[in-house]
């Protein structure tokens, strides 16, 4: 880990930790020694971060120089909190952690009154009942392949237990019917298909690219889905 990376991680640890965060707590979070934390705190202060505290007492991030000033309307804050907390409940583990980090970054740069409103927002999100199905593949790798418009290969088990292998052009990942689904153009069926992430396994990239077709393909798929939904409700 480079020192620059470690400093970024230390800033995020300070945002996340209930203040004051001790050097021992921060060292444990970053897998370094407390002595390294002492040096890195001074480095962050020299870069403009306002960090209150000292060794033996703990540290509190007062002003985050890494983030620009932010200002939101009250309803915008509620919308942000609701959206990010929903991601914490329905997102994959990487996205859930990213949503938590985004909330702490927002809280660090909002004015005190708005930070208080974010911390105690009226709106929130909870999910009860059965736990979310666990994806059978690396969702972060799937998101990267989708964004970079790279064809992927995976094994798939359908609802009837039939197993196939698919090459698809990944278009979008959506949450529907209590599970995460990949919307894709399937080479085997030569048509659009949706695949549940918990039924996918052995994900890999084929080396082929379908750039720049993702956006128009996704648009066509969504138009078809909306038409099928309208026909279903009309029947």
Image (cartoon, grey):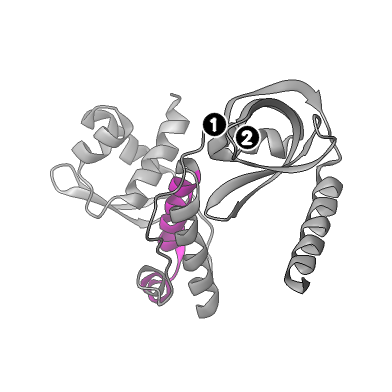
Residue indicated by mark 1: 138
- Cβ atoms at labels 1 and 2 below 8 Å apart: yes
Q: Mark 1 packing: few (<14 Cα in 10 Å), some, or many (20+)?
A: some
Q: Mark 2 packing: few (<14 Cα in 10 Å), some, or many (20+)?
A: many
Residue 144, x across and y down, in percent: 65, 35
Residue 231, by quadrant, is bottom right
Q: Secondary structure at mark 2?
A: helix
Residue 206, x across and y down, in percent: 74, 21
Q: Residue furthest left?
A: 56
The magenta stretch spans which residues?
Answer: 95-116
Q: Residue at x 82, y 63 (%)?
A: 227
Is 7 situated left or right of 235 in this image? left
Residue 155, x across and y down, in percent: 63, 25
Asked if residue 156 is positioned above or below residue 54 in the image, the reply reads: above
Residue indicated by mark 2: 142
Dominant secondary structure (helix, strand or loop) of the stretch shown in magenta: helix
Q: Secondary structure at mark 1?
A: loop
Figure quadrant of the C terminus: bottom right
Residue 7, x across and y down, in percent: 41, 36
């Amino acid at each position: 880990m480079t020192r620059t990376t470690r400093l970024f991680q230390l800033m995020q640890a300070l945002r996340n930790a209930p203040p004051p965060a001790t050097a021992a707590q921060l060292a444990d979070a970053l897998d370094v020694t407390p002595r390294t934390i002492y040096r890195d705190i001074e480095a962050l202060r020299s870069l403009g971060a306002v960090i209150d505290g000292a060794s033996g007492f703990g540290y509190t991030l007062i002003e985050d120089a890494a983030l620009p000033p932010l200002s939101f309307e009250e309803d915008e804050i509620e919308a942000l909190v609701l959206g990010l907390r929903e991601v914490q409940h329905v997102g994959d583990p990487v996205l859930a952690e990213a949503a938590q980090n985004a909330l702490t970054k927002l809280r660090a740069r909002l004015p005190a009154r708005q930070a208080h409103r974010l911390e105690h927002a009226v709106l929130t999100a909870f999910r009860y009942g059965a736990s979310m199905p666990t994806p059978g593949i690396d969702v972060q790798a799937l998101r990267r392949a989708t964004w970079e418009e790279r064809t992927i290969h995976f094994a798939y088990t359908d609802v009837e237990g039939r197993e196939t292998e698919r090459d698809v052009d990944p278009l979008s990942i959506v949450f529907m019917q209590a599970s995460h689904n990949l919307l894709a153009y399937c080479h085997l069926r030569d048509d659009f298909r949706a695949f549940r992430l918990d039924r996918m396994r052995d994900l890999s990239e084929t080396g082929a690219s379908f750039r720049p077709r993702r956006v128009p393909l996704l648009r066509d798929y969504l138009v078809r889905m909306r038409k099928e939904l309208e026909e279903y409700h009309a029947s």
